[in-house]
Every structure is written in structure tokens, then in C-alpha cells.
Amino acid sequence: MIFNSAEFLIFYPLVLLGYFLSPKKWKWPWLLAASYFFYMIWNPPLIFLILFTTAVSYVSAILIEKSESRFKRNFWLTATLVTSLGVLFFFKYFNFLAGSVTSVLNFFDGGERDFALELILPVGISFYTFQTLSYVIDVYRGNIKAERHFGWYALFVSFFPQLVAGPIERPDNLLPQLKAEHRLDAANAWAGLQKMAVGFFKKIVVADLIAAYVNTVYNDAQQATGWGIVIASVLFSVQIYCDFSGYTDIAIGCARIMGIRLMQNFDRPYRARSIKEFWSRWHISLSTWFRDYLYIPLGGNRCSKARHYFNLFVVFFVSGLWHGANWTFVLWGSLHGVYQIVGAITKKPRMKLYAALRIPVESKGFALWQRFWTFTLVCFSWILFRANSISDVGVLLSRLFSPWGSLSATLDTLGFTLVTILITVFSVILLSMLDAIGANEAISEKGTLSRQYTAGLLALIVAVAWCLLLSVGGASAFIYFQF
Amino acid sequence: MDQWDFLLSVDSAENFPWVLLMMLIFSALGALLAFCEHRLRGKWIWLAANAVLTTVAVAVFLALGAGLSELLLYLLLFLFIRLCFVFWEGRGNA
């Protein structure tokens, strides 16, 4: 089930009704049943995969806690990592690896081997696998106690708002909240509804309306012009942000109405002044996961410079691979690793240069300049992320570095009119205003204009945009579902 | 045909210039009502007037044959005006 579907509009109020009306001992079975139903609407048999991952991590965490010798603790941790990552590898990466190997072999001997299996990629597998791994590793490190109640733990793994696209929650944040008694609270309900309205605005009004222009360019790379690639890449940077942060906002809003606070996943990432800062604002739950469970265990920055750069590259390489089984994602992650390494190497010389040239590094103008370059680098990397294949990346980059053609002809090809350009521009401006209001209490709390009316207007806009999308083919799934 | 003429091609509304004009008029009225709501805090009458204005605007656009795109553009414009007031107040209070 996806949030922007008619089924969800019936499902969610029913879940809320059952949650608030049921006694405490019935809350977890109700939410667990609802979460499994939410997942099974898409593909019922794959619920057994979630159950398997849940059971393995539940049992191994208890065994790790009970084990007295270090050897046994290591054994159970390794067994869990191999099992969970093995399942993830099989479903997500087997065909990718098999395809890569066979294409190399076929290239050398002209054969026609095909080792690919007919596998369905289970929605959200990367998200819930990482969530279970963080739980088991935290128990191993002694940061948390192993959960003895299977029901609560299963709910932690499969809590429906964040099951298929995050945020990747940590057990010490989510488990105690799930167990706590929550009553219907007006402040929580209002905050949750506002967050959901903003999420739906991002997804339906901005991301889905922009998607058509982006798809026109990226799904037919051979016909793309330089202008088309630039426009589509800038629009894709807005689309993917709105698509993913919109999902997160709806998830956070859904949980908040139930009194549960999920972690923040985005913090206005395109305001970042460096790639390093970008990653502290983009997909925060994944960035912090990699920091805590991969970067720091590798040695972080408390080692030699060469080792530090290696650690950075490994983290971003793996992050790229996490996003999808395609060389385009690996290239995208690796490029961000290179950005980080170059940023770290050139930091001191750049600071010396700014001082020598007497550039006021704290000025607003300089901040704007840094934001522009960071955004440009991020936009460039999105070309690798969005391209359908490595060969498409080659075509798009060659077009980008050759004459761009006519702007008016490109806009005409993309299907832009005055009205659609104005809708795009206004929706992006409104997006940045809504983000700023969400991030600044001085703006959001002290206004005299009716917030209820403004929220109602936002809901009306979402409804009109939804009708518009339905008239041209219907709502689309969230991009991050495929990861 | 000028190379930029395609921008003015509108499939949904034959009366597009009128729709555009009405959009500007209703937006100006929306700004006026938002200002009144800001000055006379908490007066439900301005809230009701805003709701009536939105309803009338939607009815007028539909009567002029405007499509969902034009309607969406007007609502975005209207929300933009309200958020500008929210920012203006927020900056003053910050």
C-alpha cells in the first residue's frame, strides 16, 4: 500500500480508531496486524521474509545477551550478519552480480550465458534489514537490552509508517515509544496532520508533477539535448527530495498522531555549504547508520590520512550499492566519496586561499556561493543516480559537454507552457517556504493568520493536484520504495 | 510563429487571458483579506471571507472554462500570498 492511494485514506483512519479505542494489551497486536496488512497489500507471501528476518534477529539478540564468552557473542553476531545480509544480497544483488559476471564472460568468449533468476525485489528490504542489524549490533555492544517480547519487537521491525522507506529507526528511540501508553492528543494530532499535509504537498504537487518532465529526458537519453539534461537534472534534484522527504513527512505525521515521534530524516539539504554538510542533512537516518555501524568501526578519522580517505570512500561506495543493484548507483556513491575526499584534501589550502584573498567566509554572499556550488555538484551526481543504465550515463554526459541546442525548442519538447512553468516555479518556492516554516518556530508558532485555514488550503491544493494527476495517468509510487 | 509562442498555448482554457486577469484580481483580494486578518486578529469574519473568496474564485474559473492546471496555479498563488504574510509576521516576532 502506498500513502498516496485511496486505500490508505480508508486504512489509516481505521487503524487510528482501533489503536485509540483498544486497551493497552491489544495495541501491539492491532498495530502489528495493521502493519503486516499494509505490507501484504503489495505482495502477501513476502511477509514471510520479514517474519524470518525478525525471528532471526530476535533470537540472536537474546543469545548474544545470554552468552558469557566473547567467542559465542561473536559467533551469534556473525551468524546474524551473514543471514540478514545474505537474504538482502540474494534478493537484491544476486541478479546484478550474475548479470555483471555473465556479461564479462560473454564478452570474452562470445557465449550467451544467462544466470539471472526470476526474483521479486521485496519492497523496503534494505530498510528493515538495516533496522534489525542496528538492533542486534546495539545489543552486542551492550547499548540496549535484548527485547524479550516477540510482539513488541516484531512491531519495531514492521511499524507501518516507516516500514518500506524509513526513517531507519534505532531501537532505543522507537521501542520504548511503541510500548508507552498513548492517548489521542489534540497537539499531537494537529502537528501530525500538518506534517502529513506538507508531505502530501511535496509528493503530489511537486514531485509527481515534475516527474513527467524528468522522465521525458531520462527515458530517452538518445534524444536529450544539453538544455534538456540541465533542466531535467535540476528538476530531478527537486523531485527526489520531495518524493523522499514527502514520504518521510507523511510517515512522521502518521506516527505523531499516534503519539510516536520518528527521527528527523531531512534538514533542508540543498542549503548545505559543502558535500559533507549535505550528507548531514540528507537521509539522516541512513547517514548516521553508516557512521555508527561502518565508518567508525573502520577507524573513522582517528587513523592515518590515507586510511581516513579509504574509510570515506568505502562508506560512500557501500551507500551507493545500498541504494540499488545497478552500476549507476555504485558510480553515484563513489562520486560522492570522491567529493568528500577532495573536500578533505583541499580544506586547508582553500582556507589559506580565502584568508590570503580576504574573502569574508562568514558572509551571506559567500554562503550563497558555496550553496550554489554544492547544489551544482549534487545535481551533477543525480545524473548518475537517475540514468537508466551506464550506457545512458555516457550518452547524457557527452551531450552535456557538447553544444546545448535551443532552450525554447527543449522547453517545447518537454511540454512546458506558461501555466506549467508557473506551477513548477510556485510549487518550488512554496516548498522552500514550507520547509523554512517547519524548521523555524519563530515563524510557525507566532503568526496571527489562521493556521487551520492555511492547512485547509494546502489540503485543497493537494486534492486538486491529485485530480490532475489522476486525469493524466494516476499517482506514482515513491522512488525510494525500490531500495 | 515566434519560437516562444508555444508557451502561450493552453489546451484547457479558451478564455485564458480572462482566467489570468481574474487570477490577478482574486489574488489581490486574497492579499487584502490576509492583511485584514493580520490587523484584526482572530476575527472569524475574515476567515469566513477567505473561504468565500476561494469558493467564488473556483466557481468563476470553472465557469470561464479553466482546467485543473489553472485552478492549481491560482491556489498556489493564494497560498504563496498567505505564506508571505506568515513569514512577514514571523520575521517581526523572531
Image (spheres, coloured by chain):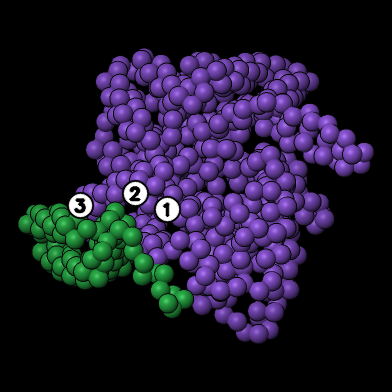
What amino acid is labelled 3 in the image? Answer: Tyr
Task: Tell me the quarter of the picture where residue A406 sits.
Answer: bottom right
Image location (x, y in percent) of residue A434:
36, 57
| Image-based side of A470 in relation to A304, left or right | left
Host chain of mark 2: A
Image disc number at residue A85 = none
Q: Nearer the viewer, residue A351 or A332?
A: A332
Crowd around label 1: few <14 · some 14–19 · many ≥20 (10 Å): many
| Image-based side of A157 in relation to A118, left or right | left
Q: Residue furthest bottom?
A: A357
Host chain of mark 1: A
Q: CA distance from mark 3 to mark 2?
A: 22 Å
Residue in the image at 30% along x and 39% along y = A188
Image location (x, y in percent) of residue A457:
24, 52
Q: Earlier in the sequence, mark 3 or mark 1?
A: 1
Q: Which residue is mark 1?
A: A209
> Which chain is rendered purple in the image?
A
What amino acid is labelled 2 in the image? Answer: Leu
Q: Secondary structure under badge 2?
A: helix
Q: CA distance from mark 3 to mark 1?
A: 24 Å
Image disc number at residue A468 = 2
Image location (x, y in percent) of residue A27:
36, 19
Q: Nearer the viewer, mark 3 or mark 1?
A: 1
